[in-house]
Image (cartoon, grey):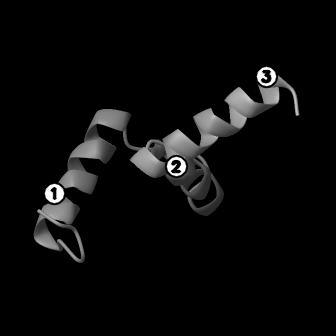
Amino acid sequence: MTVRRLLGLVRWYLRELTGETAYDRYLERHRLAHPGVPALPRREFERRRTDRGDEHPGARCC
């Protein structure tokens, strides 16, 4: 395995772990489900995601 490939895997893992890929997945789903309709800007998406997490904490520690 090359260093470049290893760094790519580490980057992918960290983005998944921190939830940074959530917006990318949202954009893809939105594009498929609602073609031609503008998606939420990232800031609004993150605000709603945070609000949803606060309303439904689930299994988080804090």
Task: List the residue tagged with mark 2.
Answer: 16
Which x, y percent locates residue 32? 65, 58
Classed neighbour count for the residue bearing mark 3: other residues with Cα under 10 Å, few (<14), some (14–19), many (≥20): few
- Locate the N terminus and report the quarter of the image it occupies: top right
**Residue depicted at x 32% and y 46%:** 45
- Decide which of 10, 41 is in the foreground and name it: 10
Q: Is residue 17 left or right of residue 49?
A: right
Graded by Cα atoms within 10 Å as few (under 14), some (14 to 19) or many (20 or more), the crowding at tag 2 reads few
| Disc number for residue 4 | 3
Indicate the position of residue 26 as horizontal and vertical percent values: 50, 53
Q: Nearer the viewer, residue 20 or 45?
A: 20
Camera-side residue: 17 or 21?
17
Q: Which one is in front, 9 or 20?
A: 9
What residue lies at 29% left-to-right and 44% top-to-bottom? 46
In the rendered image, the residue lying farthest to the top is 4
Task: Tell me what residue is drawn at x 46 percent, y 50 percent.
Answer: 17
Q: Secondary structure at mark 1?
A: helix
Query: What SS does tag 3 mark?
Result: helix
Query: Residue tagged by mark 1?
Result: 51
Mark 3 vs 2, N-terminal side = 3
Q: Is residue 16 above or below residue 62?
A: above
